């Protein structure tokens, strides 16, 4: 295989068969961590930037691209922008690993690390306020907005979902970790067309608000949100499973012991959810789970016992069930109003001299006009 660009290093057909992983059921783990920059997010990064170019809204050596990321998308965008000739500013937070931040800087990105949590216990609200400040100070800046940009969904409908459909004659369950919900929405949209009886399971950490869960402090990057993303309106999971971070760590460590692969935190969360729903699988079911990245970036966190003891600590052993999880089980439309921004968003300043409120930033992008720089 001869390549002309690092962006060709995307491995689309890697599935790790896990014999008897979920009770007696095999599970097929789609490995995205062998892609360039180490995650599924390189697809998202290419899709977001190329969509911007097709719309005539980006010019190399002139446009400054801006995005909020807890790590993987920021790293992928750093490479894409370096290759295509764009300046890139990534707003991240103190949960991002040192390795990821250093990688972004090596590719030429400017990295802004926020340290203050938002009132929901996460960092996303603070990151989005910082983006508003960057857009005001950089006249040529364009925010890609992975949280509402329809291109985020489309790239995974066209690529990730089709990669699964090409590999299997049928798929009965697919488990997807959720952050922006772009991967979930794209996979759900396409695979329902191919496999009408499929069950789509959204997996998120306890403390994420995406599907109506109570907000709480989270420490593992790459999964969950403290501000509900606009793309979640397009995600139609059959089930929502929330997993506490202690169980995520346990899943990562047991997977390393039993299956000899170091996976990332979101992958551990997904694997824990698969095992939680194992009693519902039927004989002959094809079960696919998405592993968004591998674990090398997390050796100083998830795989460091001292960090785990200090930052996460022991958690309640009972499985976490959000209101949305209960609603999905009962077949009700929704248990809480997910269409409204979190109450703390409503009072954010809208004066031009102040950062725009988070809900405004997210809502500025619709299916028809989904890029913002104001």
Image (spheres, grey):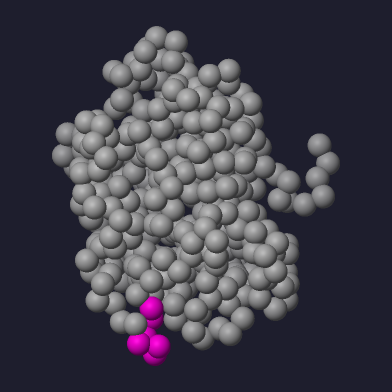
User: Quick check: 308 above or below 96?
Assistant: above
Q: Nearer the viewer, residue 56 or 30?
A: 56
Percent across and percent down for residue 53 are: 69, 64
From the image, which quarter does the N terminus lie in? Answer: top right
**Percent of width and height locating residue 275:** 33, 25
Magenta stretch, main secondary structure class: loop
Instruction: Between residue 126 and residue 213, name the one nearer to us.
Output: 213
Let me know if residue 214 appears in the view. Answer: yes
Q: In front here: 249 or 80? A: 80
Residue that protrudes farthest toward the top in the picture: 283
Q: Could you say where residue 239 lies in the image, as x and y percent from the top left?
A: 32, 34
Apparent side of residue 264 relative to residue 78 in the rendered image (left or right): left
Residue in the image at 28% along x and 60% along y: 340
Magenta stretch holds residue 353 = yes
Res 14 visible: no
* The image quarter in which residue 63 lies: bottom right
Q: Is residue 303 above or below residue 260?
A: below
Measuring 39% from the left and 50% from the top, which residue is drawn there?
A: 233
| Above or below 360: residue 183 | above
On the picture, is 316 further left or further right than 127? left
Relative image position of residue 309 (x, y in whole percent): 25, 48
Magenta residues span 351-356
Instruction: Give the residue at x 53% y 30%.
Output: 193
Quarter assignment of residue 335: top left
At a point 37% along the width and 46% down the height, the residue shown is 302
Q: Is residue 223 left or right of residue 296?
A: left
């Amino acid at each position: 295989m001869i390549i002309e660009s690092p962006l060709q290093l995307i491995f689309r057909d890697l599935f790790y068969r896990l014999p008897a992983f979920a009770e007696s059921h095999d599970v097929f783990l789609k490995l995205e961590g062998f892609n360039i920059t180490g995650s599924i997010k390189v697809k998202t990064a290419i899709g977001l930037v190329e969509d911007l170019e097709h719309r005539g809204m980006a010019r190399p050596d002139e446009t400054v691209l801006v995005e909020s990321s807890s790590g993987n998308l920021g790293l992928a965008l750093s490479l894409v922008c370096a290759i295509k000739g764009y300046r890139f500013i990534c707003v991240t937070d103190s949960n991002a690993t040192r390795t990821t931040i250093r990688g972004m800087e090596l590719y030429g990105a400017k990295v802004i690390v926020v340290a203050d949590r938002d009132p929901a216990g996460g960092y996303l609200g603070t990151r989005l306020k910082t983006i508003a400040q960057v857009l005001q100070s950089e006249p040529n800046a364009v925010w890609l907005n992975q949280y509402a940009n329809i291109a985020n969904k489309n790239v995974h409908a066209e690529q990730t979902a089709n990669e699964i459909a090409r590999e299997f004659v049928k798929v009965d369950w697919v488990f997807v970790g959720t952050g922006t919900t772009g991967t979930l929405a794209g996979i759900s949209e396409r695979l329902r067309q191919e496999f009408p009886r499929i069950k789509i399971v959204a997996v998120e950490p306890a403390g994420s608000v995406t599907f109506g869960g109570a907000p709480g402090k989270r420490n593992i990057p790459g999964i969950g949100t403290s501000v509900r993303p606009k793309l979640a309106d397009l995600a139609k999971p059959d089930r929502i499973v929330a997993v506490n971070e202690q169980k995520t760590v346990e899943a990562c460590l047991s997977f390393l012991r039993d299956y000899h692969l170091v996976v990332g935190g979101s992958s551990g969360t997904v694997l824990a959810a698969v095992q939680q729903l194992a009693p519902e699988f039927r004989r002959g079911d094809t079960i696919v789970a998405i592993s968004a990245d591998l674990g090398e970036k997390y050796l100083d966190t998830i795989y460091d016992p001292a960090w785990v003891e200090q930052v996460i600590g022991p958690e309640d052993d009972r499985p976490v069930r959000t209101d949305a999880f209960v609603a999905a089980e009962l077949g009700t439309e929704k248990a809480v109003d997910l269409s409204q921004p979190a109450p703390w968003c409503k009072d954010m300043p809208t004066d031009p001299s102040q950062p725009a409120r988070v809900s405004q930033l997210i809502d500025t992008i619709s299916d028809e006009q989904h890029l913002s720089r104001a």
